[in-house]
């Protein structure tokens, strides 16, 4: 009978060690430029995956605070903030904020290209920032008009739009937006200005709250100036319009 030759298999650990050494040697032999490029793209991939994970978590986990809220809490020795679900906020408040900040909220994918083009033509950024962009900025980034922050905001906003329903974007925005110095979220704002819960806000109160959002440290919903009263009236009209023409359907049934 012919003898069988049995080949012994290398030990798993030894083989793995040998392979890792070979890979390390190959890495060293690789040109420096190629190694830098590979490290760069690995870093980009890691950052992208971290951003995606953070946005996915934000869809289901209510943020207890934000970077800006924490900085204000340190400066003011505390802030007023309490989370409230969307179904406990008066529907007119939802429409008022959308009418004031982003009337086409239900029609864009995060970036309002028409508004951006108009802002560029007018030489300003007024009206170009959507509610989705503001939510990304308030929740994940920092305040301040830097090119880096704007670039990150523009990149993250479409991801948020793809992963979150519109109602969730609006819910988060209303719960972390600043309505007065140290007053964050619609629940705290409703009690701070009008001594009522967010579910009991009237159309007038909702419009005045929405009117202070662009400059919460300079405007007061409880003591509105002539300009703020005029702006609030415009917001009430806009809120009624988006309800009638269907532009509120994505966040209200």
Image (cartoon, rainbow, N blue to C red):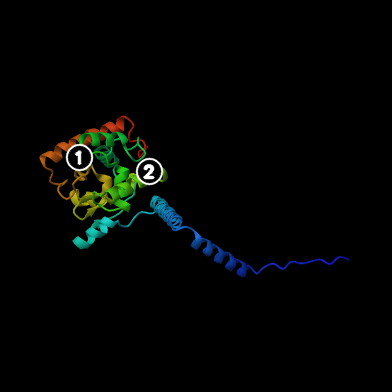
Image: 203 above or below 194: above
Q: Residues within 10 Å of mark 1 (few under 14, many from 20)?
A: some
Determine the residue positioned at 39% across, 52% down: 51
Question: Residue 109 is drawn in which quadrant?
Answer: top left
Q: Look at discs 1 and 2 and give the one toward the viewer.
A: 2
User: Which element is circle 1 on?
Assistant: helix
Question: Residue 203 is drawn in which quadrant?
Answer: top left
Residue identified by numbered label 1 = 204
Q: Foreground: 215 or 221?
A: 215
The residue lying furthest to the top in this view is 245
> Could you tell me residue 174's position as x and y percent?
29, 47
User: Which element is circle 2 on?
Assistant: helix
Q: Foreground: 76 or 241?
A: 76
> Could you tell me residue 240's position as x and y percent?
26, 33
Question: Residue 92 is drawn in which quadrant?
Answer: top left
Determine the residue positioned at 33% across, 33% down: 247
Q: Foreground: 194 or 188?
A: 188
Q: Residues within 10 Å of mark 2 (few under 14, many from 20)?
A: some
Does label 1 or label 2 sit earlier along the sequence?
2
- In the image, taking residue 60 as reference, residue 212 lies left or right, namely left
Image: 114 above or below 182: above
Give the number of the disc on residue 217.
none
Mark 1–mark 2 contact, CB under 8 Å?
no
> Could you tell me residue 90's position as x and y percent?
28, 43
State the CA–CA distance, disc 1 to disc 2.
33 Å
Residue identified by numbered label 2 = 158
> Could you tell me residue 14's position as x and y percent?
61, 70
């Amino acid at each position: 009978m012919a003898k069988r030759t049995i080949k012994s298999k290398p030990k798993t650990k030894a083989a793995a060690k040998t392979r890792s050494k070979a890979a390390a040697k190959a890495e060293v032999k690789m040109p420096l430029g190629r190694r830098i490029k590979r490290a760069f793209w690995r870093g980009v991939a890691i950052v992208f995956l971290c951003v995606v994970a953070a946005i996915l978590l934000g869809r289901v986990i209510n943020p207890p605070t934000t970077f800006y809220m924490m900085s204000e809490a340190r400066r003011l020795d505390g802030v007023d903030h309490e989370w409230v679900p969307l179904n406990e906020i008066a529907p007119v408040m939802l429409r008022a904020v959308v009418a004031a900040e982003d009337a086409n909220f239900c029609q864009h994918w995060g970036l309002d290209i028409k508004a951006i083009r108009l802002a560029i033509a007018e030489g300003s950024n007024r009206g170009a920032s959507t509610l989705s962009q503001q939510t990304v900025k308030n929740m994940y980034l920092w305040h301040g008009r830097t090119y880096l922050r704007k670039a990150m905001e523009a990149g993250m906003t479409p991801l948020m739009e793809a992963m979150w329903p519109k109602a969730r974007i609006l819910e988060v925005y209303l719960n972390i937006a600043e309505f007065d110095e140290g007053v964050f979220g619609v629940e705290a704002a409703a009690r701070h200005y009008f001594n009522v819960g967010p579910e009991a806000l009237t159309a007038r109160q909702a419009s005045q709250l929405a009117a202070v959002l662009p400059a919460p440290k300079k405007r007061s919903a409880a003591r509105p100036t002539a300009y703020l009263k005029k702006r609030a009236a415009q917001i009430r009209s806009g809120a009624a319009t988006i309800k009638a023409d269907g532009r509120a359907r994505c966040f209200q049934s």
